[in-house]
Structure formats: C-alpha cells, structure tokens
Image: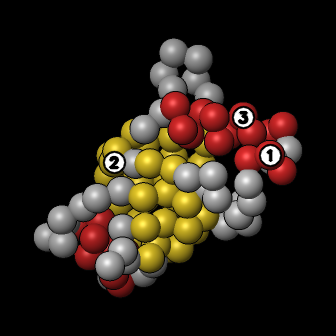
Amino acid sequence: MHIVTDGLEQETKQFSDTQKRMYDFLFATSMGVLSTIDANGDPHGAGIHYTINKQFEVAFLTKSETKKYDNLMHNDRFMLTVFEPLTQPTVQLSGIALRSR
C-alpha cells in the first residue's frame, strides 16, 4: 500500500515549524495504528510499521489476505495514528490509500 496524506505535499525545506516537527517525529517513529472502515461501516485498527518520505507519503506492506487490505480496497480512506508512549506526542494523518504496482 502507498498512502497519500492530505495537504502536506512539499519539500521539508518549505515546512512550517509544526510540519517539520511532525515530519521528524513520524520519520523517527516507524510504528502506528492504521484505522480503516469495513464494508459494514465498522471501524478497524491495525498496528503497522511504515516509512514516510518528504512529501508526507506513507508506505507500508501488507498481505492481500488481511482485514486492513480488504477494508482499503472497499474504502480507500484511512487514518494513521502515531504516538510515543514516554513523552506522549501524537500525530494523526488522514488520506487516501493507493495500491502500489
């Protein structure tokens, strides 16, 4: 899966201070909870390992036999919640999932 997040498609040199802190946090923290909606409208959360690039595009691998895969094929909207338990910062990204080739 390749995830494109809403509204943050720019180079890091153009980031605001808040966006730079978000990017640095997301780059340093490689695990989060991917939230999706199934065909019945029920929410589903799954822990994932991800990568992020300077355009705030998130990528992760999943098997096609997973609930998150099925949900994203049905409804491509998602939310990724990333947190760090010791100092408790949290970042939430929402966007549209794109299937990689």
Which x, y percent locates residue 34? 41, 55
Q: Amino acid at mark 1?
A: Lys
Is there any visible trace of residue 75 in the rendered image?
Answer: yes
- Check disc 2: other Cα within 10 Å, few if <14, some if 14-19, many if 20+: some
According to the picture, the residue beneath numbered tag 2 turns out to be 48
Q: Amino acid at mark 2?
A: Ile
| Residue 21: assigned label | 3
Vertical position of residue 48 compared to residue 22: above or below: below
According to the picture, the residue beneath numbered tag 1 turns out to be 13
Task: Please give left or right for residue 61 compared with residue 98 in the image.
Answer: left
What separation in Å lies between label 3 and label 2 (alpha carbons)?
21 Å
Which x, y percent locates residue 43? 39, 64
Q: Nearer the viewer, mark 1 or mark 3?
A: 1
Vertical position of residue 13 compared to residue 85: above or below: below
Q: Residue at x 26, y 76 (%)?
A: 70
Q: Residue at x 40, y 39 (%)?
A: 31
Helix, strand or loop at disc 3?
helix
Q: Amino acid at mark 3?
A: Arg
Task: Please give left or right for residue 58 compared with residue 9 in the image.
Answer: left
Label 1 or label 3, whichever comes before in sequence order? 1
Q: Most extreme residue toward the top, as rendered?
A: 86
